[in-house]
Amino acid sequence: MDVKALVAQMTLEEKAGLCSGLDFWHTKSVERLGVPPVMVSDGPHGLRKQDEKVDHLGVNESIKAVCMPAACATAASFDRALIEKMGQAIGDSCQHEKLGVVLGPAVNIKRSPLCGRNFEYFSEDPYLAGEMSAAYIGGVQSKNVGTSIKHFAANNQEHRRMSSSSNADERTLREIYFPAFEISVRKSQPWTVMCSYNRINGTYASENPWLLTDVLRKEWGFEGYVMSDWGAVSDRVAGVAAGLDLEMPGSGGINDRKIVAAVKAGELDEKVVDLACERILKINYRYLENARPETPWDQEADHQLSAAIAGECMVLLKNEGMLPLNRADKVAFIGEFAAKPRFQGGGSSHINCFKTTSALEAAGEQGLDVTYAQGYSAEKDEATDGMIAEAVAAATAAKVAVVFAGLPDSYESEGYDRAHMAMPACQNRLIEAVAEANPNTVVVLHNGSPVEMPWLGKVRAVLEAYLGGQAVGIATVRVLCGDVNPSGHLAETFPVKLSDNPSYLYYGGEGDEADYREGVFVGYRYYDKKEMEVLFPFGHGLSYTTFACSDLRLSGSKITDQETLTATVTVTNTGARAGKAVVQLYVGDKESTVLRPVRELKGFEKVALQPGESRDVTFTLDKRSFAYWNTQIHDWHVETGVFTVEVGLSSRDLQAAAEVTVESTVELPRHYTADSIFMDVMADPKAVKALGPMLESIRRVFAPNADASDAAQEAISADMGLAMMRYMPLRGLVSFSPDKVTDETLDRLLEALNG
Ligand code: BGC
């Protein structure tokens, strides 16, 4: 379709109309020109398609669909191919249901364990979040259905979510909160981007030209259209000018009329409106011209796929020789989540599942000898004495007690943040009682975000099943019994307690001001720098076998920032079972003039290995792997120096390391004034040269005088002298130099330095 020609035939009113939704879920039609509406729908881990009587909170029933594991779980797979496959299945279901765009993936960074929507987001690490997101987008869009990567940007809390301002410095945004979007745009070109509700440093994302145009389009090359989150528009005209193409849902024509008025008044260039329409239509026709409503949707097959994916995501946090279970053993399943798993979160991503399979059902189907005790009521958030007594009896009568615990729906959801990081007290009490009754106690967790585990020392194994989708029960039993060897790794740190989290002091903000004062030190970037104990580190995950990483080889010991470096490591399955290792590569700048984390994830691969098998895994590192965001040149920059490359099975299980020197090819602009200090001047070889003999004369002032008395030499040692000189401004030459340095000489010197 020649969308330019189409837009050229539209009236200003039609064009303004096209820039907002028809209703909650459709773009508008232009009947006169035969332009049909296109339907979009949530997302991200399955379809929430509402046909009749739409409302966006999911109060009205949506069609029966398949709920895949939520992003908190899928990120733990560290498996790009798996996420792509999930995307393909979702893409096919969209085709079947005539949906042009699925509203996801949601890639916001987990700044605090408290964010109510953490379950929908991938990680505390921007690289991992970006890679997972790009894989998801690639999968969905391979079916000619669009995605809407959301929520752009810095939308990391639910508290005051439609008005609060995420106040973060430039470097923090670039290094932590933007890359998941950037990687996705550069790698997978999402058809649409959804801007977030919040403001960024005071300006709403929905009317932020720097965000929506300069960064997103001009820098990253985004080609699709930007839509608003539902109700995120404050000033519609400013939004159009900033690059917000589509307002969702519509405003009943009110904002459309404002666009028309602004164009007529000469306040908004009509060409900007044209461009928004062209972008929307280009995407709509990309779907319409490739629509395949005859695509079959085998929901039972997707149910099985959901189970298979969930099995690859579960993280075995602890295992003291307890798992896998012996099938012949008598096992007690305790806790309501065994019968009614919590497998998805609340809010706009909530799916009306065509069926669910609990662990209890799956155990029956898989011929396990299992007894069951409810233990607690998730809905009432209580465990009566009777429930506990029944659970203890079941635990006592069994060889192994598996407690299914975690967070009830009311503890985490879109729309509000968690108040604390604790599990329900009644569930903690239950676990303690069961562990007391039976030393062979295993805990299976269903939660979308980290929890404190006061009972950790008393149980022998913990399996983090996250919110694993509607077939989570099948996957849980497979993993418990060893039919699936767990291979998930944490995409987030589990701190010991909430107050350990770097955003703890500031999270939520004061009124509408949410200051990101911890800067780039988010998640493990903080815990590692502070050398803090954590409950479970980023990247952690056990297996029923063991792995070793050895023999890290770099393609060179010195590169420039224009060259790439390959790092190859040998990973070996050193145990007795087939399994999958998640090999992680971290880079750290050994010495830096800017504040940097100790290490940052820059590569990962999931590798399947038979017992005894070894394989080489190769990573390619480029400038970005070593760079930080430099606020002087507003660009990525590598500071010349030595970098550490570490490889291992978690951020705290690093088994091989090597060093490389990276040389910058970019000279940072320097400008010296009389207030510049000698230390900075002397770090610049060109400046040292320009200083010439003057440097010598100033050195003499601070050098110890051999003839001076002992007392004088004691008062100013050589080291002190040097330190005093390092921190002295150039203007000090006038006061301290034995040679006659005047203001005029200083000016000439500055000219030479800056020339
Ligand atoms: C959510 C989005 C969602 C949209 C449509 C908003 O409240 O923030 O993630 O896609 O509603 O349901």
Image (cartoon, helix red, strand yellow):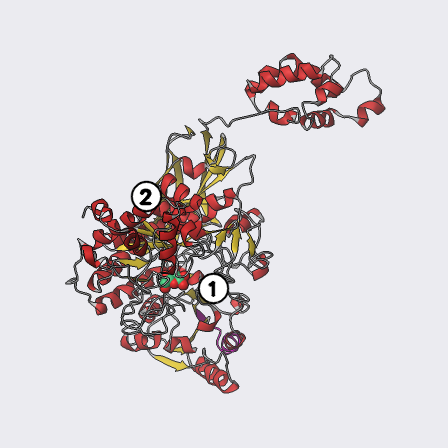
Determine which quarter of the picture holds residue 54.
bottom left
Determine which quarter of the picture holds residue 374.
bottom left
Apparent side of residue 510 relative to residue 398 in the rendered image (left or right):
right
Residue 696 visible here: no
Extent of the magenta region = 431-444
Apparent side of residue 501 relative to residue 478 in the rendered image (left or right):
right
Secondary structure at numbered mark 1: loop
State the image coordinates of residue 722 (x, y, percent, origin top left).
70, 25
**Which residue is rendered at x = 29% and y = 69% of the image?**
50
Q: Nearer the viewer, residue 90 or 741?
A: 741
Q: Nearer the viewer, mark 2 or mark 1?
A: 2
Q: Residues within 10 Å of mark 1 (few under 14, many from 20)?
A: many
Q: Quadrant of ligand 1?
A: bottom left
Quadrant showing the C terminus: top right
State the image coordinates of residue 45 (x, y, percent, origin top left).
33, 62
**Amino acid beneath label 1:** Gly
Q: Residues within 10 Å of mark 2 (few under 14, many from 20)?
A: few
Residue 111 visible here: yes
Of label 2 and label 1, which has the lower sequence position? 1
Apparent side of residue 44 relative to residue 447 in the rendered image (left or right):
left
Determine which quarter of the picture holds residue 501.
bottom right
Task: Quickly name the residue at label 1.
Answer: 116
State the image coordinates of residue 240 (x, y, percent, origin top left).
38, 49
Q: Kindly report the distance in space between the C-alpha atoms of the residues bearing marks 2 and 1.
A: 40 Å
Apparent side of residue 96 relative to residue 737 in the rendered image (left or right):
left
State the image coordinates of residue 418 (x, y, percent, origin top left).
51, 66
Q: Tag on residue 271?
A: 2
Q: Tag on residue 262?
A: none
Q: Nearer the viewer, residue 325 or 555?
A: 555
Q: Is mark 1 within 8 Å of ligand 1?
A: no
The outermost residue toward the bottom is: 386
